[in-house]
Image (cartoon, rainbow, N blue to C red):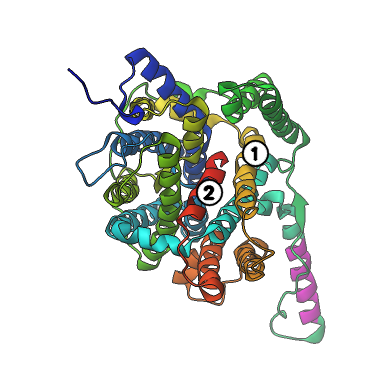
Amino acid sequence: MSTTPVHPVDERLPPARLATLGLQHVLVMYAGAIAVPLIVGRALQLTPEQVALLISADLFVCGIVSLIQSFGMTKWFGIKLPVMMGVTFASVGPMVAMANASPGVEGARMIFGAIIGAGIVAMLLAPVMGRLLRFFPPVVTGTIIAIIGISLMRVGVGWAMGGPAFLAQRTDVPKLVAMVDEAKATATLQAASSGASAPAAIKLGPIPMVDNPNYGALDNMAVAGFVLIVILLLVKYGRGFVANIAVLLGIVAGCVVAVAAGKMGFDKVAQADWVDVVLPFSFGMPTFDMVAILTMSLVMIVVMIESTGMFLALSDITGKKISQNELTAGLRTDGLGTLIGGIFNTFPYTSFSQNVGLVGVTGVRSRFVCVAGGIIMIVLGLLPKLAALVESVPTFVLGGAGLVMFGMVAATGVRILAGVDFKGNRFNLYIVAISIGAGLIPLVAPRWTQQMAHGLHPLLESGILLTSITAVVLNFFFNGGKADEAGAIEAAKAAEAH
């Protein structure tokens, strides 16, 4: 009696091995998974407890969406391949722009509303995304990924320095008060000598500023440098799994140094509960702004294009061909995960390329490994003490790791662009040059939108979106919409490192 052979993707491994391999996937993605809630939570100026809530929600929803994507949920959702889902870095720029425009809980509610709206739009667009793939050849995707990394480097450097660049100096209040008093006295004397009934307007010089001693503190930068060195040593001399989690181990090493130096405490960890349930709408009912929804919907289109290439690459790696309906189900899950993320106080989701690369490295193709990883992520999301511990990590420790994480994203974009034909098609040079230039506008001129309608700021203050729109339009103008599925697969394979 013959039995139908089981494809390696559908193989059910022993529970102990599933748990071990699932934990491996979780550890590989963990540093990247927690980075986004830390960035956005601090941009929103939320309290440490609220940032910890974002981290718990992120891990919890990471697990839920990974389960749906890898195990499947009806024929409509789930690619049923070994996929771990996490928050996409592509969404960080627009969300930080929204946070800067409207900080605090109100800004969080607007962001979650935009994410919910974008998730619905993404689910509706999923069936047609395959047709849009031709508008995103490697010259476009490589440029977009490069500007994502370049934009995020500002965050990584800010972490290492102790905060954003505007914190480098602060107003010298005593000197300013003295200047005002002196100017008032001078104006009064002048009025008395001239017989005027009231003093003339006070004229002050430049506002006196003083260097912030906490910005660029040498001891903090030394810890960030130590973290970077540890990561580089692990990457060079570590083998296999150790090298794959070098960033996470570098952060742990930096935390040990910070604790020894008295720069990291555990008071918030002690106060946090051991177990708690992640509830929807913890920040209140979301608000829905059409420009913000449009902004996040454009991000989701970019995310789904990247996911399309990733799924095709994963199909190639695992040897399991996927149909158009299965591809649509996978992309629809990106939208569903984003919708769930907005409901549970977290962010847009996509397949994590580090985990796609891990499938190729380990040779284990079973999707149930990622099912196990999803279950582990859900459990981690129910442990507030773990989220409080992550939130307690000093920013300068994260700075050393951020330089690696975000720099690798930029390097991955360069790696994809290395396969683009610049010699035979000179137009590609213009696409890359102008698109990156457009993406750098918000970085070098942060207030360039101050004369424009306030509602457009979240859209125009994101270098990632400006680059995406510019690259797509210029590519269509110069190259037309030529189908390039093979190019998308190769670009996705090159993106496995980011």
422 and 256: which is toward the camera? 422
Q: Is residue 280 left or right of residue 173?
A: left
Task: Quadrant for residue 407, please give it.
Answer: top right
Give x and y (percent) for residue 209: 75, 56
- Write down the region rendered in magenta: 179-192
Q: Say if the magenta span includes residue 190.
A: yes
Q: Is residue 184 above or below residue 494?
A: below
Q: Is residue 388 left or right of residue 8?
A: right
Task: Quadrant for residue 384, please give it.
Answer: top left
Give x and y (percent) for residue 75: 21, 44
Q: Say if the magenta span includes residue 451.
A: no
Cα gap from disc 2 to disc 1, whole angstroms = 23 Å
The majority secondary structure of the magenta stretch comes to helix
Quarter of the picture containing the N terminus is top left
Q: Earlier in the sequence, mark 2 or mark 1?
A: 1
Q: Is residue 242 above or below residue 132?
A: above
Residue corresponding to mark 1: 404
359 and 247: which is toward the camera? 359
Q: Is residue 432 visible?
A: yes
Q: State the SS at label 2.
A: helix
Q: State the SS at label 1.
A: helix
Quarter of the picture containing the C terminus is top right
Residue corresponding to mark 2: 490
The residue depicted at 62 percent of the width and 43 percent of the height is 408
Q: What is the residue that sits farthest to the left in this orientation?
A: 1
The residue depicted at 74 percent of the width and 53 percent of the height is 174
Q: Is residue 373 above or below residue 106?
A: above
Give x and y (percent) for residue 399: 65, 38
Give x and y (percent) for residue 367: 35, 30
The amino acid type found where label 2 is placed reads: Glu
194 and 157: which is toward the camera? 157
